[in-house]
Image: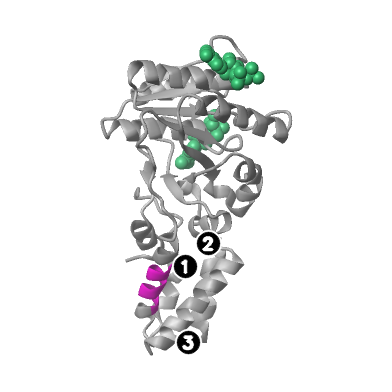
Amino acid sequence: MAERSSWSLSGALRGMFQRPTIDESTWDDLEYALITADFGADVAEAIIEELHAKVDRYHTTDPRDLKRMLRETIEERLSNFDTTLKLSERPAVVLVVGVNGVGKTTTIGKFAKFIGNFGRTVVVGAADTFRAAAVDQLATWAERAGAAIVRPQHPGQDPASVAYQTVEYAQRTGTEIVIIDTAGRLHTKGGLMDELSKIKRVVEKQAPIAEVLLVLDATTGQNGVQQANAFIEHAGVTGLVLTKLDGSAKGGFVLAVQERTGLPIKLVGQGEGIGDLTGFTPHVFAEKLVGA
Ligand code: GDP
Ligand code: GDP
Ligand code: MG
């Protein structure tokens, strides 16, 4: 993960771990720190219950033990989800979905570069044909990432048709990974879900869809999950991308969002630069969150 970690709990926990022994105020401080970091009341409560049991089992009164147990508990809970990207098909088709402004197009640019770093070839498809500027934005990112792009041939072209042509391009040229950008808003939510279903239906006639990644803005926390519910219910999402973690004080959201949605986090964005995207590793994340 990047250096910036405003979402780290270490500040909020510092006082607690400076006390000589675990006492009632330790637990109060811990609960407050977890709630403030947007773990959500239910997840915070479950973690505290688990830690109480561990502290009892090991008969410890040392706050440093509690810190280690917190780190392990968070890591264990994060590891209940398979966070690895499944990109073994050729081509591997990735659909990127989510509400407007969460960071879909930016993520695709970073992701194309990320994949390119592993020596894979990438084509991106500009199937957000709803806004003309969206195509140019994706084209700029594709160029930076060294990826090919398939654009609409005329403004407002059917997004499913752009997606189709992108997969066709990959099959014709032997390009390994296809990433398709999509719109975040239409006149109605139903319209957008129908559009995404159509994209999936058309693409699946050509190649299986490897991943449907739902992008969530970490700064919006639990509200963002509410906004994204329609995608979770209708778009066949296989994984989450959390963006803007660099601007978020809510590291606990990372755990809460997996437990709330039942979906694994597969990528994390921590900045607007092309290198600011990483895979998601529970061990690394738990260590950054709680402190070593
Ligand atoms: P889209 O509407 O979902 O395609 O969102 P965009 O990709 O256009 O991004 C919306 C805004 O969020 C842009 O200003 C991006 O630069 C910004 N953004 C995206 N990802 C990140 C991130 O990880 N960190 C920060 N700080 N900004 C981001
Ligand atoms: P329809 O739009 O309701 O007729 O749905 P279809 O499933 O027939 O096609 C959906 C979209 O995929 C259409 O907008 C087509 O432009 C596109 N499509 C389907 N087959 C092809 C094809 O063979 N070539 C191209 N270029 N596009 C196709
Ligand atoms: Mg976009």
Q: Is residue 129 above or below residue 14?
A: above
Q: Earlier in the sequence, mark 1 or mark 2?
A: 1
Q: Magenta residues?
A: 66-73
The residue under the point 64% across, 28% down is: 195
Q: Amino acid at mark 3?
A: Asp
Residue 123 visible in rendering: yes
Q: The C terminus is located in which quarter?
A: bottom left
Give coordinates of residue 179: x percent, y percent: 44, 29
Point out the residue furthest to the left here: 119
Point out the residue furthest to the bottom here: 59
Pointer 1 and pointer 2: residues touching (CB < 8 Å)?
yes
Pointer 3 and pointer 2: residues touching (CB < 8 Å)?
no
Point out the residue furthest to the top here: 154
Give coordinates of residue 45: x percent, y percent: 56, 73
Determine the CA span between mark 3 and mark 2: 22 Å
Numbered circle sitting on residue 23? 3
Q: Earlier in the sequence, mark 1 or mark 3?
A: 1
Q: Nearer the viewer, residue 24 or 131?
A: 131
Numbered circle sitting on residue 12? 1
Q: Is residue 290 above or below residue 249?
A: below
Residue 21 visible in rendering: no
Quarter residue 81 falls in? bottom left
Determine the CA span between mark 1 and mark 2: 9 Å
